Image: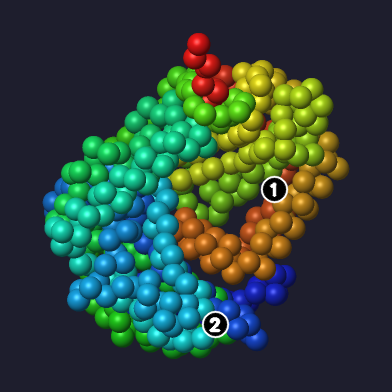
């Protein structure tokens, strides 16, 4: 394995790409008893269209999340969660729009836990009975999301903002689409994307890096296998699909989310720099210390629930904010006006430098969290960027880049607003 040191962060990473294509990263945490491992596949809810070995597939919406659930089934009725518990470890998983991750944390028995993680994620076992049973569980999860205002307002926003991109579809799928998921569908998706060449293993802790790599070879083998080639059939311009969508639920006061559709960033250092520029621009526009936030807070248009930032996934990007307000449309209009003011007047250099120091400090402090560090290393690796290189990226950013970003992004034709109002009283 190759070791790279980052003295500025007091960090280092052991890296190797195994013969089977798996990327292995080990971040030493000498003297710590906690150990954390993430086993991640570059496959999320938007990746339903793909080719594998010359054939084209269209998987039903929600298949990545369904597959995440079913991976915890093992032949012989083994209970993966219980086996981790017996080893003194906790195991979990999540599915996002563009990745799926399985992870565990432990203080003892690391080697046995890592073997179990690699084993169950790489073992497809889908019976008709178990797939049918899981459908009921996910059906209930979909129902819970439908009853959650935060989820409803966000999913409405994505359908409002985007016209074709599959971010329009819920990560869980719908009650209709999950009924199209069969053992055969799960098998082909697992074969396409749960293969070492499409995955990475990231470990933090006081462990032997070579032992981690050797165990991955032992469990997963050394043979390279075909990887599904993702298709991205959606065609999106930068205009919002519609400006406003409203709904009514059991909420005390109106809750909202709004977003400006932005140019997708792609991969590599230039893309990550673009993301960091956009994050800083969001802070300048509506961050907690921004003039706009303070003004709207004093006017009673915002409360402490308000927050925002920049979000990017495969093929999509957006400048977003959310919160509770008695007049969300007034908040939207004020944000547009403030963006135009910043573009016209610029950002004072002292304010810019303070924001940049603050953002850099938050990222450095985030390295204290095993989970945050492991997640970011995986996510940024999928975007072809070495996450520990972020201090140098921040140093290169100039204030004018934030202004240029806001000039392009903050305009009414790119904006969608989703509001959930309280239910009207019935007489």
- Element at label 2: loop
- Residue drawn at x 19%, y 63% is 126
Instruction: Tell me where residue 46 sits by quadrant.
Output: top left
- Residue drawn at x 70%, y 21% is 334
Residue 32 shown left or right of residue 222 in the figure: right
Instruction: Tell me where residue 343 sits by quadrant.
Output: top right
The answer to whether 230 is drawn above or below residue 234 in the figure is below
Q: Residues within 10 Å of mark 2 (few under 14, many from 20)?
A: some
> Measured from the top left, where is residue 290 in percent x and y?
78, 35
> Measured from the top left, where is residue 406 in percent x and y?
65, 31
Circle 1 or circle 2, nearest the eye: 2
The answer to whether 179 is drawn above or below residue 210 in the figure is above
> Measured from the top left, where is residue 48 in percent x and y?
27, 46
Which numbered disc flags the more N-terminal residue, 1 or 2?
2
Residue 240 shown left or right of residue 283 in the figure: left
- Element at label 1: loop
Q: Are marks 1 and 2 in contact (CB under 8 Å)?
A: no
On residue 397, which mark appears?
A: 1
On residue 107, which mark appears?
A: 2
- Residue drawn at x 24%, y 40% is 177
The answer to whether 176 is drawn above or below residue 244 in the figure is below
On residue 171, which mark appears?
A: none
The answer to whether 144 is drawn above or below residue 256 in the figure is below
Residue 396 shown left or right of residue 320 in the figure: right
Out of 132 and 207, give the one closest to the viewer.
132
- Residue drawn at x 64%, y 44% is 279
């Amino acid at each position: 394995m190759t070791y790279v040191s980052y003295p500025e962060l007091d960090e280092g990473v052991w890296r190797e790409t195994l013969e089977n294509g798996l990327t292995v990263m080990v971040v030493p945490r000498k003297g710590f008893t906690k150990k954390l491992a993430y086993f991640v596949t570059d496959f999320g809810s938007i990746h339903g269209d793909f080719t594998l070995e010359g054939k084209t597939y269209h998987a039903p919406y929600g298949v990545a999340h369904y597959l995440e659930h079913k991976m915890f089934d093992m032949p012989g009725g083994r209970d993966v969660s219980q086996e981790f518990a017996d080893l003194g470890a906790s195991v979990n998983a999540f599915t996002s729009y563009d990745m799926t991750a399985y992870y565990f944390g432990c203080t003892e028995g690391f080697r046995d836990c890592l073997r179990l993680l690699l084993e169950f994620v790489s073992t497809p076992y889908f019976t008709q009975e178990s797939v049918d049973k899981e459908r009921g569980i996910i059906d209930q999860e979909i129902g819970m999301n439908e009853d959650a205002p935060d989820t409803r307002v966000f999913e409405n926003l994505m359908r409002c903002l985007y016209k074709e991109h599959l971010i329009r579809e819920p990560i869980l799928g719908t009650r209709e689409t999950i009924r199209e998921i069969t053992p055969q569908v799960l098998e082909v998706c697992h074969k396409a994307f749960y293969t070492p060449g499409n995955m990475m293993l990231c470990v933090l802790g006081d462990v032997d890096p070579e032992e981690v790599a050797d165990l991955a070879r032992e469990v997963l083998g050394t043979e390279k296998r075909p990887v599904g080639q993702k298709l991205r059939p959606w065609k999106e311009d930068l205009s919002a699909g519609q400006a406003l969508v409203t709904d009514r639920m059991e909420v005390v006061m109106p809750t909202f989310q709004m977003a400006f559709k932005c140019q997708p960033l792609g991969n590599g250092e230039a893309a990550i720099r673009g993301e960091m520029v956009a994050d800083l621009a969001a802070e300048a526009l509506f961050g907690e210390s921004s003039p706009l936030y303070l003004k709207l807070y004093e006017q009673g248009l915002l409360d402490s629930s308000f927050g925002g930032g920049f979000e990017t996934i495969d093929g999509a990007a957006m400048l977003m904010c959310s919160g509770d307000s008695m007049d969300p449309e007034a908040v939207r209009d004020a944000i547009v006006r403030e963006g135009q003011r910043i573009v016209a007047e610029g950002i004072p250099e002292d304010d810019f430098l303070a924001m940049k120091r603050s953002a850099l400090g938050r990222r450095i402090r985030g390295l204290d969290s095993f989970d945050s560090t492991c997640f970011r290393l995986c996510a940024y690796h999928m975007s072809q960027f070495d996450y520990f290189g972020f201090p140098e990226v921040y140093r290169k950013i100039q204030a004018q880049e934030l202004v240029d970003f806001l000039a392009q992004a903050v305009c009414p034709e790119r904006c969608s607003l989703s509001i959930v109002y309280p239910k009207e009283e019935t007489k």
